[in-house]
Image (cartoon, rainbow, N blue to C red):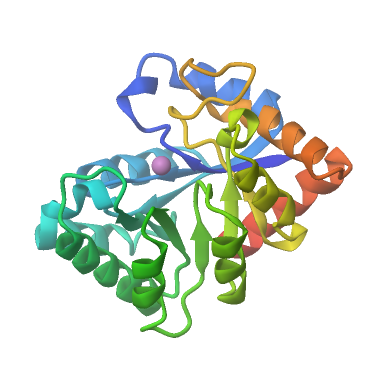
């Protein structure tokens, strides 16, 4: 059994065949899913989907790319976060790689969401791209944050910084096709009790389905690849990542 901890299955990409996508996921052994929101209206859709299925939960948040939506969006997310199917806050974070929003907007939005997570005692799903020094500055100004660095593609340095702070690390299909040896080195070094898995579908389809629309069933390819990379028995890695996701999100 596997858990897809980061699936945008409420996106329009799946509107024509969601039932088939979900049935393929369950046949592939994906027994639980987290629908992760990226802004206020999208988070509302994630929550609605979670309410329809007992094996789907939601995370609500404002992605750094949407950080310019400001207070109105953040207040909506705060309201949605009180829904019992919402088990995390995010994705939220900092993206200095490619974004139309300013650093100030991103910092405002991540601080608001961290404070919401602390208030509601919910774990955070963080998106951090080329922004770790700023991210740690903000993170370290709070105590007691729980969460995961999603789509982790940084090096062993950032990995150790995340582990020291008690964070989980989520790996996805990027690992199956990256040629970056630092990324693969870090992926091997994630302790088994801190590793969780995700697809980030519809994006980032793993090998051998790279380039197509990604979907939760494809998490198996990533899990099998990582078991090989890390020289761990498949069932051991599958079970550990599942247990970690259940522990972190309380699902
Ligand atoms: Ni995502």
Check the image and report above or below for 127 versus 162.
above
Residue 174 showing in the rendered view: yes
Give the percent coordinates (x, y) of residue 36: 41, 45
Taking the image as shown, residue 238 lies to the left or right of residue 119, namely: right
Check the image and report above or below for 97 versus 244.
above
Please give the name of the residue rendered at 31% of the width and 46% of the height, measured from the top-left corner: 97
Check the image and report above or below for 38 versus 141.
above
Please give the name of the residue rendered at 55% of the width and 19% of the height, measured from the top-left corner: 210
Taking the image as shown, residue 147 lies to the left or right of residue 139, namely: right
195 vs 88, nearest the viewer: 195
Check the image and report above or below for 142 versus 121.
below
Q: Determine the image quadrant of residue 226.
A: top right
Taking the image as shown, residue 122 lies to the left or right of residue 184, namely: left
**Quadrant of the image where one finds ligand 1:** top left
Give the percent coordinates (x, y) of residue 74: 19, 61
Give the percent coordinates (x, y) of residue 47: 35, 46
Please give the name of the residue rendered at 12% of the width and 53% of the height, measured from the top-left corner: 68
């Amino acid at each position: 059994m596997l858990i897809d901890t980061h699936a945008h299955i409420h996106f329009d990409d799946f509107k024509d065949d969601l039932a088939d996508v979900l049935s393929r996921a369950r046949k592939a052994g994906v027994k639980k899913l987290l629908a992760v929101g990226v802004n206020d209206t999208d988070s509302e859709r994630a929550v609605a989907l979670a309410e329809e299925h007992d094996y789907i939960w939601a995370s609500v948040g404002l992605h750094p790319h949407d950080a310019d939506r400001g207070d109105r969006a953040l207040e909506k997310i705060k309201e949605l976060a009180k829904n019992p199917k919402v088990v995390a806050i995010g994705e939220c974070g900092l993206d200095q790689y490619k974004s139309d929003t300013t650093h100030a907007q991103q910092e405002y939005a991540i601080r608001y969401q961290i404070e919401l997570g602390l208030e509601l005692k919910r774990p955070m799903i963080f998106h951090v791209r080329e922004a770790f020094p700023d991210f740690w500055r903000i993170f370290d100004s709070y105590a007691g944050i729980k969460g995961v660095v999603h789509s982790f593609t940084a090096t062993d340095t950032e990995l150790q910084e995340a582990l020291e702070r008690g964070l989980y690390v989520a790996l996805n299909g990027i690992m199956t096709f990256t040629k970056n040896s630092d990324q693969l080195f870090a992926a091997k070094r994630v302790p088994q009790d801190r590793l969780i898995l995700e697809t980030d579908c519809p994006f980032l389809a793993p090998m051998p389905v790279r380039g197509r629309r990604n979907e939760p069933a494809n998490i198996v390819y990533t899990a099998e690849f990582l078991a090989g990379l890390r020289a761990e028995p498949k069932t051991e890695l599958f079970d550990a990542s599942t247990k970690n996701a259940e522990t972190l999100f309380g699902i």
